[in-house]
Image (cartoon, rainbow, N blue to C red):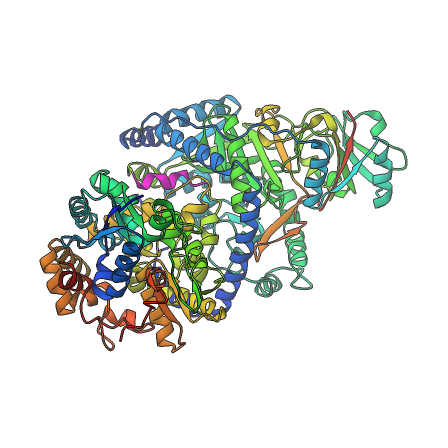
Amino acid sequence: MSNPRVALFATCLTDTLYPETAKAVVRLLERLGCTVDFPLEQTCCGQLHFNTGYADEARSLAHRYAEVFEGYDYVVAPSGSCAGMVRETHPGLCGSSVPVERTFELSEFLVDVLGVTDVGAYFPHRVTYHPTCHSLRMLGVGEKPLRLLRQVRGLELVELPQAEQCCGFGGTFALKNAETSTAMLADKMRCVQDTGAQVVTAGDNSCLMHISGGLSRLRTGVRGIHLAEILASTEEQPWVATP
Amino acid sequence: MGRNPVTWLGSPVFPKAAHTALADTQLRANLRKATTTIRDKRASAVAELADWEELRRAGEAIKDDVLANLDTYLLRLEESVTARGGVVHWARDAEEANRIVLDLAREHGADEVVKVKSMATAEIGLNEALEAGGIRAVETDLAELIVQLGRDRPSHILVPAIHRNRAEIREIFRREMSEAPVSDDPRELAEAARRHLRRKFLSARVAVSGANFAVADTGSIVVVESEGNGRMCLTLPQTLITVMGIEKLVPSWRDLEVFLQLLPRSSTAERMNPYTSVWTGVTPGDGPSRFHLVLLDNGRTATLADEVGRQALRCIRCSACLNVCPVYERTGGQAYGSVYPGPIGAILAPQLADDPSDEQAASLPYASSLCGACYEVCPVRINIPQALTHLRAKVVRNKGGRNPEALAMAAAAWVFADPRRFEAAQRAGSLSRLLTGAGPIGRLPWPGSKWTATRDAPSLPKESFRLWWRRNRG
Amino acid sequence: MGSAREEILARIRAAGAARPVTVPREYRRERRVADPVALFAERIADYRAVVRSGPVELIGECLGARGVRTMVVPADVPAHWRVSGVRWLVDDDPPLELSVVDGVDGVLTGCAVAIAETGTIVLDAGQAQGRRLLSLVPDYHLCVVRTDQIEVTVAQALSRLDPLRPLTFISGPSATSDIELDRVEGVHGPRTLEVLIVDG
């Protein structure tokens, strides 16, 4: 495929709190020959509202999404959860539309649309991968992120025990049922630490924010880094921690 | 009409109940062991069938057909049961069903009834109602017996005593049985239950059961079990009273070929459960000479009226969703404050309760991280996450817009509706507080404190991505 | 009674759930396996049933091996099943008292159908099977299964059964998973199930 025109849907969380992830997506997709645009009219997919029971608010955000991303060949989001919201829930909220059908989570886009698993990345660290629930069960990304990670030079991939168990984030669940969320997080952190990995990665900054927030509180030294940042990292331009 | 006892009166809201459960390390250890044991077994039992997905789709559609034509199938069932010598009763709610069973038990001169494990009778609080009417109900399923003797509440659909380990069960039996078990070996505990119940089985005059399935065409009732206590109750007493929810139907005999595969593999992770009994009305010379079937509504028709929520009525009570649920694994079933715990309970109990003022019931749809593990294993493909968000929306509507959460959500929606406001909020740092429920620094007041109690919040970046984009690419 | 019935039916009709539903039956109802008899033997043994194959005369050996003295049988079992060396109580007219059935060492029956894939035998109170309680109350159940009674799948077995008869599906001895979700055999039903597979 030559020069697909891709719109980046950064998601409100990544746009606001994790700009490095969005920059990494841009770098990565451009390296792979895509033309990337970031429509500035975008805001949020409405998942926060929808999952908390505010469907009307979510509906208008779904309409906004469809308008903003109309006219692009593809929309790519560095989030299984937001891509899942768009593909699984938006049709019920505002009817199906072209941007909805052409929205992909990053690893899906790389493997299924661009047809690459070796993206030329270099990341010399011991890494474990947490499959976030919505990429796993809603989108069914399956092995795609792992196939991408296995091709990263220098990267030692270690299997996460009980990987498919939810980390306990769940959006407002983490606040409304904070103690249960924390109990789930504690088990997830134990599994991460058991791997001896230096880095835990995932396709969603929301879950990563939760996991690495816990790991940081415990001063474990394990970092949470989004899959996009690992895949964007090369020998010439290696990943660096933001201050 | 009395209060629907499907949720237990006086139960705290879920987060509060979870607080207590999470502090109980023994409970958590018991739950973890039990749920992880069954998870792997279920996965291999399911993996044996190459057509599992096709069976799920058939199961889903058969149940949808039942719900779409419930009046027709119920009338057909009534006709076929009556034609075979059974008597059919209809009960609008728990109170009415309990009254029917109590009157029947009295009529047949019983001061004690033996019971087959039944969710429907647990849901309506039949044992308590019989007790109040002077009739003792004896639970004969091992787990139900443990709960009854321990004066406890159930915590699982299939294994109500899953929160108890062998040592605790032995202690209950030692306290309550004339012949105590000699050790906590499950074999010994089962043997103790056998001795304890044997005489009751042989002398009981009235039995009460639920039904796993009822075949509309033939009037056949199906009870699926393991221990043989069901067979004892279904065949030895002269009178059998079966209480079933109106949704437990299947249209025809052939449909059981789907459910007799889906149910055992999903629930106990067996290719087939040890015993399945099927009877149609009464058979002279074999089994009870009197058969009564009580058809129970108790909130089911209200559930049926909800286009999204009605899928909960497809449930065949296998409990696979409980066994894979990360929330259930940590809190156990009693935290849900209902006989229907876990993911299915979180969508079924509030709908059956059908009471907008019940805050405990309203807390249940939020008792989920929406991870979707329940939907993945459900043999009748109930989209539990979808139903959960749908019921959350109902809760929000009932609460109205004048509470802190609704105001915050309205504010967020206002911000998200316009990219300029969105950007301004990013600059002000207020959006990060909203998104994390916390903030860039320190420990914040509620709801931020809920986040920062156990997690560090991310530090606020120098600039958002959109600012960077505008500076470099715009 | 009329009012509850009418009210529930009215609520159902008012619920607006009526719509056409087509049931996709793409699952497989039949399956060919090389040796259904062997599969049945393997699967029912998997759930701790004792399995033997051979001539019906092996009944004597089964009973001898267990030291059984008194057995109950339905009236219509073939006469040669009642081997010598054992006291046979026949459930005839009038039927045996429950206390008598509770006191015997075991019961001998045939079955209606067996399911290989799940390791299940099905009794339908027909020929050589008797009343339901016979195969329930004694602690030992010896069941004779003819090879021509074995079907591979659940669907095939169900299509051979008459739902108007009282049916009991038996897969191994009585069991429970109620303690820590771990399966243990032996609660209220027969703690030993022995299956004798005979040619037929």
Position in image of residue C70 (x %, y %): 82, 39
Position in image of residue A94 (x %, y %): 20, 40
Vertical placement of residue C58 versus C189, above or below? above
* Foreground residue among A134 and B258: A134
Vertical placement of residue A227 versus A4, above or below? below
Vertical placement of residue A72 versus B408, above or below? above
Residue B22 as seen in the image, left or right of residue A174: right
Image-quadrant location for residue C36: top right
The quarter of the rendered structure image containing the N terminus of chain B is top left
Q: Main secondary structure of the magenta part?
A: helix
The quarter of the rendered structure image containing the C terminus of chain B is bottom left
Q: Residue furthest right?
A: C85
Position in image of residue B400 (x %, y %): 16, 53
Q: Does residue A157 show up magenta in the picture?
A: no
Q: Is residue B110 visible?
A: no
Q: Is residue B17 visible?
A: yes
Position in image of residue B333 (x %, y %): 44, 57
* Foreground residue among A18 and C121: A18
Image-quadrant location for residue B146: bottom right
* Foreground residue among A200 and B283: A200
Q: Which residues are magenta?
A: B308-316
